[in-house]
Structure formats: structure tokens, C-alpha cells
Image (cartoon, helix red, strand yellow):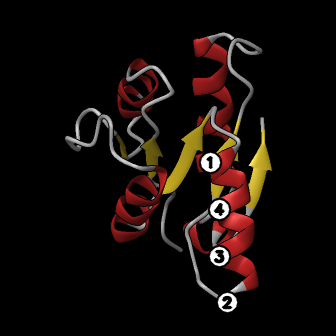
Amino acid sequence: MARLKFYVDENVDVRVAEGLRRRAIAATSALEEGLLGASDEEHFGRATALGAVIFTHDHHFVEMALRRGRRGEEHFGVIFAEMHRLPMGECIRRLALYADVLSAEEMVNAIEFL
């Protein structure tokens, strides 16, 4: 079983990706990928190319995941959290828990809410 990898959308503080890496969890961000200002579709495409779960505060990614599912297109999952609802440290802890209990295969086409 492959371990989860995360792609942190540009609407999320890059320190979330850094915090995940400190926990030995593969993570990258839109900033690190050079995609600041890119379209949501470009972000989704990059995460898919990386085989990574998207972590976002942007509800459009949930809608895109649903549309892709209806078209039979596979993605590696989306985890959504409302901005400012959870402190950054709590987001990191919860994402680390996902990485501990779920495999990459279990997150394929999944949509989760923190």
C-alpha cells in the first residue's frame, strides 16, 4: 500500500506542507511547484500528476472532484477544511492522521472534510 502524498493548494499556508514533511509525510505546495496564480484546473492536474491528495480551503476543488467522478476521471482525493475554522497545527495533526490510517489507494476519488 502506498502512503499518502499531499499537494497543498495556494489558499493554504505553505507551512502546512512544511509541517507534514517534518512528520516524514510527502507534501508539496503550489508555491513550491511554481503554480501561484495558476487556475484551479492546473492545480488539480499537477496534484494528479504527482499522485497527491489535494488539501484546500477552496470549495471549487470539491466541485471539480465531483465533476471528475461523474465523468469517470480518477483523482487522488481532496481534503477540504474551511479557512480559519481550524488552527494550522490542528490541520497538520489531522492530515498526519489521514496519512497514518489511509493508503493512497483508499483516497482515490475520495472527498473528505476536516
Q: Is residue 68 left or right of residue 50?
A: right
Q: How far apart are the alpha carbons under marks 4 and 2?
A: 12 Å
Q: Nearer the viewer, mark 1 or mark 4?
A: 4
Which labelled disc corresponds to residue 64? Answer: 4
- What residue appears at the point 62 percent right and 37 percent down from the top-left corner? 95
**Three-letter residue code for mark 4:** Met
Q: Residues within 10 Å of mark 2 (few under 14, many from 20)?
A: few
Q: Badge 1: few (under 14), some or many (20 or more) residues near its Cα, within 10 Å? A: few
Number of numbered markers: 4
Q: Are marks 1 and 4 in contact (CB under 8 Å)?
A: no
Split into 4 quadrants, where in the image is the N terminus?
Answer: bottom right
Question: Which amino acid type corresponds to the residue marked 1 in the rendered image?
Answer: Asp
Can you tell which mark lies on residue 72? 2
When asked about the image quadrant of residue 67, the answer is bottom right
Q: Residue furthest bottom?
A: 72
Residue occupying the point 62% across, 62% down: 77
From the viewer's side, name the closer residue of 74 and 52: 74
Q: Quadrant of residue 85?
A: top right
Q: Position of residue 39 (x, y in %)?
A: 41, 49
The residue tagged 1 is 100
The amino acid pointed to by label 2 is: Gly
Q: Which residue is mark 3?
A: 68
Q: Quadrant of the C terminus?
A: top right
Which of marks 1 and 2 precedes in the sequence? 2
Disc 4 + disc 3, Cβ < 8 Å: yes
